[in-house]
Amino acid sequence: MLAVPEVQAEFNKAKETYGINYSEGMEAFARAIEGTQPEVIVAAQDFQAVVEAQTSSVASGLLNMLENAGRAEHKPARPEIGTAYAAPTNETEQLTADIWQDIFGIARVGIHDDFFSLGGNSLLAIQLVSRLRKNFKVEIPLSKLFEFPTVAGLSATIAENQVKQKDLEEMERLLIEIEAMSPESVQVELEVIQSSNEEKVNG
């Protein structure tokens, strides 16, 4: 992720604001393992003050805050990013584009628009992947967004992962069936498959 300039900039900014240096980290680690507390929080700020500020300013968690950030009654038009607008061509692309529009808070996103050209950063990347996983019920590594940073690219990855997931589920189902069979029944099934393959070769 740090190979992407936008992510590196976000990381460095967060590190400067909230991070600790090496010696402070070593000291915190030593104190944590020498102590008897079941849980330890290391914070560069007054942690209780941060918690109280978050509690008073947000009714829900960080993800809900991020998800609602771009939802406005009248979303601004798509920015000029040097890529011609291309409408979604299938259901997967449409749902993916809708999620991008929610996240960026703009009226429409084309399937070839680049995530980072639209203003994407590490927080938005995490939110986007989380929303895609939730809506499509498939595992999508965060690295795929940096490899395919467009609606079209991500949609193709989602479709591919859905096929793989179905294949895995079918394989698991077959394994469960085989485990429930007797050795004799397994042998009979194998002989039937072998005979069928031989007929295809000879035919």
Image (cartoon, helix red, strand yellow):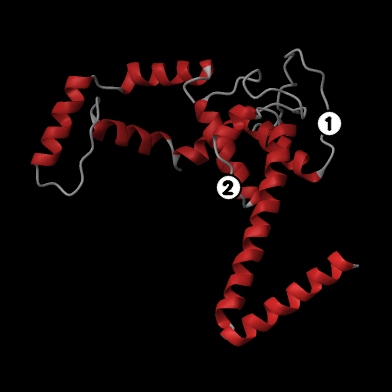
Q: Residue furthest right?
A: 203
Could you give the CA–CA distance between mark 2 and mark 1, rounded to whole angstroms? 25 Å
Say whether residue 105 is left or right of residue 51.
right
From the viewer's perspective, is residue 22 above or below residue 91?
Answer: above
From the viewer's perspective, is residue 31 above or below residue 8?
Answer: below
Quadrant housing residue 186: bottom right
Q: Nearer the viewer, residue 112 or 2?
A: 2
Image disc number at residue 139 = 2
Quadrant housing residue 112: top right
Residue for point 76% across, 12% down: 82
Type of amino acid under label 2: Glu
**Residue 62 x/y as whole percent:** 45, 38
**Residue 152 x/y as whole percent:** 75, 33
Residue for point 26% across, 31% down: 49
Say whether residue 27 is left or right of residue 43.
left
Q: Nearer the viewer, mark 2 or mark 1?
A: 2
| Dot 1: element | loop
Image disc number at residue 64 = none
Type of amino acid under label 1: Ala
The quadrant of the picture occupied by the C terminus is bottom right
Mark 1 sits on what residue? Answer: 87
Q: Nearer the viewer, residue 159 or 129?
A: 159
Mark 2 or 1, nearer chain start:
1
Residue for point 63% across, 63% down: 169
Say whether residue 6 is left or right of residue 98.
left
Mark 2, residues whose alpha carbon is within 10 Å: few (<14), some, or many (≥20)?
A: some
Say whether residue 177 is left or right of residue 33.
right
**Residue 101 x/y as whole percent:** 69, 32
Residue for point 64% across, 81% down: 187
From the viewer's perspective, is residue 180 above or below residue 197?
Answer: below
How many marks on residues? Answer: 2
